[in-house]
Image (tube, rainbow, N blue to C red):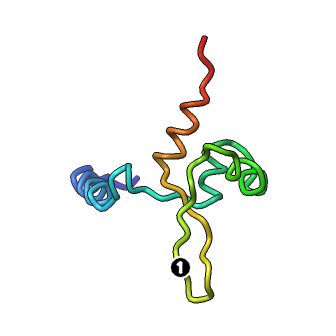
């Protein structure tokens, strides 16, 4: 059995976490949004992303013209939270 160097593992995890953007700057593509919402990417693109009140996508430029839409993860999560049922 291989020995685990926990200090090395902890340092690698800390390095990875420190390189991640802050939550308000995390950007999701349509697949990540669909996965978060537990639905198909096609349903998300065709229906959910077009709902009034759903966050406006970010369209980054690309070499071939218009890029694929992206959303701030925090905005998607906040939108979902607004639709939570109240008991």
* Secondary structure state at the residue bearing disc 1: strand
Question: From the viewer's perspective, is 4 left or right of 79?
Answer: left
Looking at the image, is 7 positioned above or below residue 19? above
Question: From the viewer's perspective, is 14 left or right of 71?
Answer: left
Residue 72 image point, x, y percent: 48, 54
Quadrant in which the C terminus is drawn: top right
Instruction: Please identify the residue farthest to the front as the structure is shown.
Output: 52
Question: From the viewer's perspective, is 73 left or right of 25?
Answer: right
Badge 1 crowding class, 10 Å Cα cut-off, few under 14, some 14 to 19, many 20 or more, is few
* Residue at image point 66% right, 45% down: 52
Residue 83 image point, x, y percent: 61, 30
* Residue at image point 37% right, 49% down: 23
Quadrant hosting residue 9: bottom left
Of residues 75 and 33, the one nearer the viewer is 75
Q: Which residue in the structure is indicated by mark 1?
A: 61
* Residue at image point 55% right, 83% down: 62
Quadrant hosting residue 20: bottom left
* Residue at image point 49% right, 46% down: 75
Residue 80 image point, x, y percent: 58, 36
Looking at the image, is 58 positioned above or below residue 38? below
């Amino acid at each position: 059995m291989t020995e685990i160097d926990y200090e090395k593992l902890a340092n690698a995890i800390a390095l990875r976490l420190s390189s991640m953007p802050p939550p308000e700057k995390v950007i999701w593509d349509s697949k990540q949004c669909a996965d978060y919402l537990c639905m198909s990417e096609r349903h998300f693109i065709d229906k959910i992303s077009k709902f009034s009140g759903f966050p406006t996508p970010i369209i980054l430029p690309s070499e071939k013209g218009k890029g694929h839409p992206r959303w701030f993860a925090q905005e998607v999560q906040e939108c979902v939270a607004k639709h939570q049922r109240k008991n």
